[in-house]
Image: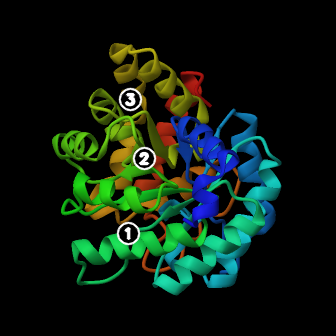
Amino acid sequence: MTAEAEDSPVVLDALHALHGRLSTVVAIPVTPFRADGSVDWDAHATLVRRLMEHGVEVVTPNGNTGEFYTLTPAESRRAVESTVAAVEGRAQVMAGVGLDLENARATARHAQGAGADSVMVHQPVHPYRSAEGWIQYHRAVADSVPELGVVLYVRDPRVGGEQIRALADRSPNVIGVKYAVPDPVRFACVARDAGLERFTWIAGLAELSAPGYWAVGATGFTSGLVNVVPRLSAALLQALRGGDFAKAMTVWAQARLFEELRAADGSADNVSVVKEALAQLELCGREVRPPSRVLPPEVREQITGLMAGWREGGWL
């Protein structure tokens, strides 16, 4: 962050306000594809507008549910532009950025120019990651957009609270952490070592892990399910905010099978499950890009049965 930006009361006030607004359901929209493999931008805008109609407050284009790693640079830029246009100021747009450092910096700057409010930095794609290099990577991205909030996407248990704290000491626009290590004890320790109140802590493994992570410090959670049945995600958020864990677990039970299908086999069908449900709602096609796959008939039938139960229960 430049000295001017760091000292600006306007910038600091905006970042502080954003910090609080991230404590919610963070929707990760899909990127719909046509049968020929091209992106269906009309369907993309329709899906984002549907999220707005259900009161979603934060949307992340170019997340993993959006098949970020399969998109071309031009497609990922347009995904941000499409989301900002469809949101029309009704929600915060947190654009996913990543890959090599120069691409991450360039896409972060593009997101800022397109009207995004913050960026979520995907875990660096590299077989060898040092603690110092992790800090340098994220600092370079954060410092390229000093007026935007920056949320770290942490999937590596080696990333500790001391590294997150050291990074934010150097780049004060780092205001949130999407934590996706499947270990709530580790999360509780990392959050407290980094600063529980200093950052917005987002449970990054969706509804299935949200109650456990909420109990030890999370104040928001990511969701792909919200694309399909937003009432479920909203009900879970309301119960957690109210401290009603019994109600939260009742809602959790409604989401469980869907999320278990997404998590099966190392999350091989994570996106495919969401797209299949959306296809059955006639909101977009079920096409995905390799290395994902279109679901086999037996899994599609499970989703059909699950959605029938949601309709009967008034969730859809």
Q: How is the image coloured?
A: rainbow
Q: Which mark is residue 302?
A: 2
The kind of secondary structure element at disc 3 is helix
The residue pinned by badge 3 equals 252
| Residue count near mark 2 (Cα–Cα under 10 Å), binned few <14, some 14–19, many ≥20 | some
| Residue 56 image offset from top left, x and y in percent | 65, 38
Q: Amino acid at mark 3?
A: Trp
Report how far apart the C-alphas of labels 1 and 2 lie in the structure: 32 Å
Query: Tags 1 and 2 in contact by the CB under 8 Å rule?
Result: no
| Residue 246 image offset from top left, x and y in percent | 33, 14
Name which quarter of the figure residue 33 lies in.
bottom right
Report how far apart the C-alphas of labels 3 and 1 lie in the structure: 27 Å
Residue 36 seen? no
| Residue 116 image offset from top left, x and y in percent | 69, 58
Q: Amino acid at mark 1?
A: Gln
Mark sitting earlier along the chain (3/1): 1
| Residue count near mark 1 (Cα–Cα under 10 Å), binned few <14, some 14–19, many ≥20 | some
